[in-house]
Image (cartoon, helix red, strand yellow):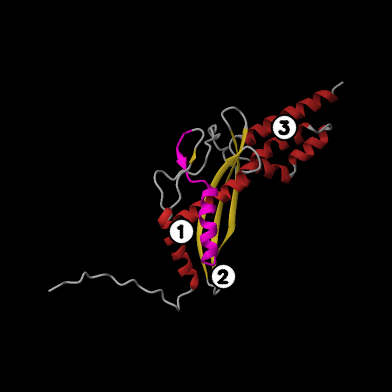
Amino acid sequence: MTVEPITKARKVADPTAPHVYQAIADVMGHLATDGIGKNNKNQQQGFKFRGIDDVYNALARTLADNKLCVLPRITSRELTERQTKNGGVLFSVVVTAEFDFVSAVDGSKHTVGPFPGEAMDSGDKATNKAMSAAYKYMAIETFCIPTEGDNDADATTHDVAPSPPPAPRTNASQAKKADVWPRFVEKLRGFTDLDELERWWSSASTQVAVDAMPGPWPEQAHEEYEKAQEKLASAGRP
């Protein structure tokens, strides 16, 4: 008796499913055959990587053949100015992007993301590079594009100086208190008439303000008042 080998029947695509998913699967199948080689080399560190142009070249024809549109949408952007070790300026940009996959056959849509993209540049290209990075890794991960080695992003590596420690944060209440003392002393020393100084000092509003001062400030305020009082009194003596 001859035993026929058992072959697994290939599943036929569900004709009722949205075309966008069939198109994504077909693009994945096409790219699984050849993948995208790492034909670019980092200038500083020497590792190989897949450039954004490699991804565009591999996707352009198969996306068109499968009637699949990829529409990017940037949802956030953050810019930080950094300094190189040589004292130059670098602009670091981080973007977050979502991508709509839309079928040109039935209009069905599927959104993937968010995907981050990060890049640095000394001119005006940091945002462009960050957007390209987000697109590249979206394509690699969504279509499972095979390759070998590490998945490094950029052709260049920047030597960035360490960021300075953040300045201590001051809330509104602390800022107001820090400003009270210099304004109070300026007010005290601005009087040119002894009677006016004494009327201002003895007023209820001034006494309430002095009593509300924190720590040793009330005592210091009294000392400053006595100095201003003595100064004006001396100036008025014959």
In the rendering, which numbered label is found on residue 104?
2
Residue topped by disc 3 = 225
Q: Secondary structure at mark 2?
A: loop
Secondary structure of the residue carrying numbered label 3: helix
- Looking at this view, is 216 or 180 the one in front? 180
Please state the extent of the stretch shown in magenta in the rendering. Answer: 45-68
Q: Amino acid at mark 2?
A: Ala
Q: Amino acid at mark 1?
A: Thr
Residue 61 x, y percent position in the rendering: 54, 59
Can residue 1 be seen at all in this image of the molecule? yes
Q: Answer with left or right where residue 120 lies relative to residue 222.
A: left
Judge whether 40 appears above or below 111 on screen.
Answer: above
Asked if the residue at tag 1 contacts the one at tag 2, i.e. Cβ–Cβ closer than 8 Å, the answer is: no
User: Which residue is the extreme one toward the top?
Assistant: 238
Q: Compute the Cα span from label 3 to label 1.
A: 74 Å
Q: Earlier in the sequence, mark 3 or mark 1?
A: 1
Instruction: Give the distance between the C-alpha atoms of the residues marked 3 and 2, in whole angstroms.
Output: 82 Å
Point out residue 121 in the picture as x, y percentages from the top left corner: 60, 39
- Circle 3 packing at 10 Å, graded few (<14), some (14-19), many (20+), is some
Instruction: Tell me the residue that label 1 is attached to.
Output: 142
